Image (cartoon, rainbow, N blue to C red):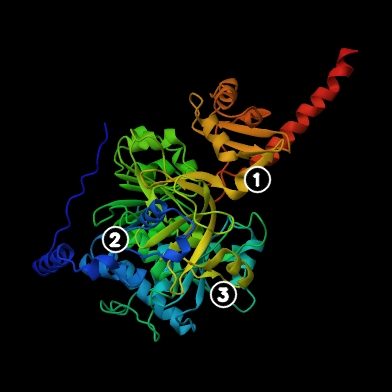
Amino acid sequence: MLNVPNYPPPRLLPHQLKTRIQSDKQQIFKTPEQARQERFVFDKSALDNLSLLDQVLFERFGQGPRVPVPFATMHQAFEHFAGIQPEAIAVEHLGESITYGELDRQANRLAVRLAELGVQTGDHVALFLQRSIPMIVGVLATLKAGAAYVPQHVGVAPEAHLNTVLDVANIDVILTLSRLQDQVPGNDGRTHLNIDELMQEPFADETEFVESFVPETAVSPNNTCFIIFTSGTTGTPNGVQVTHGNVGNILLTAPGNLGIQPGMKVGQILSIAFDMAAWEILGCLGNGGTLVIRGKDFMETARQVDVIISTPSILATFDAEHCHNVKTVAVAGEPCPRPLADKWGAFCAFYNSCGPTEVTIVNTAEQHLPWKKGLTIGKPTPNNTVYVLDENLQPLPIGEIGEMWAGGDCVSKGYIGNEALTSERYRPDPFLGDGRMMFRTRDLGKWTAEGELEHYGRTDDQVKIRGFRVELDSVSAALESAPDCTRAVALKLDDRHLAGFVSPRTVDVEAAREAVASQLPYYCTPKFIIDLEELPKTPRGKIDKRLLLEMAKAHDAALENEEDLQPELAR
């Protein structure tokens, strides 16, 4: 039975109630012009290759609702709640906690210190940290100072990667912790500041740093909020510049706000270097919740929070039976297995989401219900668009598989210091026009008849096996349909064979092989399937396919050596 979360309505003061009633009246009585402004109007000339029906559906399905964003910047959203609930707990970590009022005050002090060091609106500040309350102070102080924070998890990121981040993002100031000083590079003239030491300094009096710090140049929605660097698995890492407007558009509107409100606890589980950590941190504090930063025990955090934001790989390690306190779960970052969505969707609001960092964390989402026919990635989030296009950037009829391009307010500013790649992946939006850009996600998808998007993997996950095109995600899904299988991955071994991995080790490998053979063409059946208790994950919580491929090649080489030995053993 589905347990639909029943969130209590927010308590409104009389003046707030009056404003709310006036707002509702404005929503009920709309002029034709107001009604038109509630939706994007696509350029019809960009749709002329479609039938009239497909033109209508392409425009209807391809956009989320137009809704206002309540705050211009993310730190203003936090400051709002710090003002109305200063005694509420903002962050908890390993038995320690800090209130909204104290967190705001500490962030103001650090913002002043950053300004004294020359940090101005539009600058970039590195946060080379580990999970802690000072980490959150650093995030908010950087934003208050007008700068963008550039997060990296010290102890996980290699030193060479950290040095690349410092150079590419033009970093002059590095915020860190005193215990991490020796692990942080950048001693070549850059300023290092230990947040925890500054926090321990006593305030001069009760009023010092209570007033919010305001930089000389005001921060606007167009200013960069954070810069997230890609993992660098295909070469030099690229820094994606995400603005306050981008972030507020997803985290301060539904469904991206996940119903977070004062009194609710949100888990901080993911690496700060991962864009979904911003969903946890800013999504929580920008909506008045309490952020619970995990320690080494993931489940200890999961058992006490109302909201979990995770990758499917990490969520699969949680015991759902001991998490019935959870009201809302959102997953993104990689394809979600249907059994995992069904399990969690049976007792909480489960959102399956999709979108690369370049379109601000996620740009599609859908609440999954176990009795639904399929698991989709939903519809465009508010003020955003999705286009399913062919290789010539022409719109495809509804129901045909193509590459998803993203438009609207989710589209970030591009890659810092890499204009060539920016111009390749970000293109002028022919459907919205007006100088807007759209982004090439490299995700494949198609529209269902109900106007939801089905995900068909990535363009780089389409491989040729024996001359046939194979979608690796389809093979992975077939493997996951085997009894007891919670996670599976299919990889290209060579031009003729695939390799498969299933988890946990109790999965019957032959049953998994038969599941693929019964659902897909013969060339999709893996040459071999390896069972692992748990699939390895990257520091960002996604399945580590690079490591799995190395394991597959080593296993294949061992099999070949074994075959070579057979004639010798037979003599």
Q: Earlier in the sequence, mark 2 or mark 1?
A: 2
Circle on res. 403 = none
Q: Which residue is mark 3?
A: 171
Gap in angstroms between the C-alphas marked 2 and 1: 37 Å
Specify the amino acid type for callout 3: Ile
Gap in angstroms between the C-alphas marked 3 and 1: 30 Å
Position above or below: 205 against 290: below
- Image quadrant where one finds the C terminus: top right
Q: Position of residue 519 (x, y in %)?
A: 54, 27
Residue 162 is drawn in which quadrant?
Answer: bottom right
Q: Residues within 10 Å of mark 3 (few under 14, many from 20)?
A: some
Specify the amino acid type for callout 2: Asn
Q: Which residue is mark 2?
A: 287
Q: Position of residue 283 (x, y in %)?
A: 35, 59
Q: Which residue is mark 1?
A: 546
Q: Earlier in the sequence, mark 3 or mark 1?
A: 3
